[in-house]
Amino acid sequence: MKPHNLLALLYILVMSANTFFAVGDAMALEKAKYTVVEKQKKQAFELRKYEPQIVAETFVEGDFEQVGNEGFRRLFDYISGKNLSKQSIAMAAPVSQEAKSEKISMTAPVNMERMGERYRITFVMPSHYTMETLPEPLDSRVELREISGQLMAALRYSGTWSQSRYEEKKDRLFELIGKSGLRPVGEPVFARYNPPFMPWFLRRNEVLIPVEQGFRMPTD
C-alpha cells in the first residue's frame, strides 16, 4: 500500500472512532488552543499566543514527503492503544495488576518540523490530560513532552502538502515577519488539519514560526 493510501486509511479509522466528520474546520476534533494577538489582514498572517500543551512526539529521518506518514503511524498507534494506562488500583489481597491500554482522542493539527537531519512529528494531547494521567507509550520512539506557551506567526493556506508549496509559504512568512519587525526564535512548523482524502482546495494548512515575545524592530 502506498504511503499516502496508508495515511488516508489511518485517518478514516480516526474519523470512524469519533463517529463524526465534516468538511474543513468543522471536523469534530479538538484543536490546539491559541488566542489571536494581532491579525495582519494586509499581509495575510496572524500572531498567535499558544497555550501550554502536552504533545506526543517522534523523530523520523527521511524525505519531507515521506517522514510524515511514518511519524503519523507511530503516534496513531500510541493514541489507538499502544500504551500502558496509568490506573489507581485499590489495595487488595492477593496483589495483582493487569496491564491495560487506553485510547486517546485525535486532535488537530498534526505538526512537522525539521530538527537537524531529522523531522519531529507531534500530536497535541487532549487538554483534559496531564503528564501524570497520560498513558505511557510502549514504543520507545514515542515520547511525551510539555511545551510552554509561545508566540507564533501563522500563515494559513489551502492546497497540496508538497514540499515545494510548503517552502513557498514558509519563505513568504519569513518575509512578512521581517517586514513586521518580528524576530524568529525557532524552527518553522508545518501544520496539517485535514485527512488526505479532503479535496486539496478545502484543506487547512499552516506554516507556524515562533517569534520573540515583546520584541519588534522598527520598520520603514
Image (cartoon, rainbow, N blue to C red):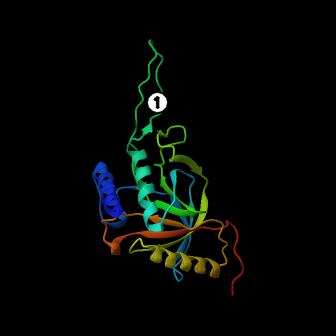
Is 48 in front, or is 156?
Answer: 156
Residue pictured at 64% horizontal, 68% vertical? 211
Residue count near mark 1 (Cα–Cα under 10 Å), binned few <14, some 14–19, many ≥20: few
| Residue placed furthest toward the bottom | 220
Residue 94's x, y, as percent? 44, 12
Exactly how many numbered labels are in the figure? 1
Specify the quadrant that holds the C terminus: bottom right
Quadrant (top left, top right, bottom left, bottom right) of the N terminus: bottom left
Report helix, strand or loop for mark 1: loop
Could you say where residue 132 lies in the image, as x and y percent from the top left?
A: 54, 37
Q: Is residue 220 left or right of residue 92?
A: right
Counting from the top left corner in percent of width and height, residue 5 is at: 31, 61
- Residue at horizontal 46%, vertical 16%? 95
Left or right: residue 46 versus residue 73 is right
Q: What residue type is labelled 1?
A: Gln
| Residue name at image x 51 percent, y 52 percent | 58
Occupied quadrant, residue 205: bottom left
Give 109 or 27, whichever is nearer the viewer. 109
Q: Is residue 174 above or below residue 24?
A: below
30 relative position to 11: left or right: right
Does residue 111 appear to the left or right of 115 in the view shown?
Answer: left
Q: Residue furthest top?
A: 93
Q: Mark 1 points at which residue?
A: 87
Looking at the picture, tell me which residue is in the foreground, 182 or 81: 81
What residue appears at the point 47 percent right and 44 percent down from the top-left corner? 128
In the image, residue 213 sits, relative to residue 123, either above or below, namely: below
Q: State the image coordinates of residue 114 (x, y, percent, origin top left).
A: 56, 64
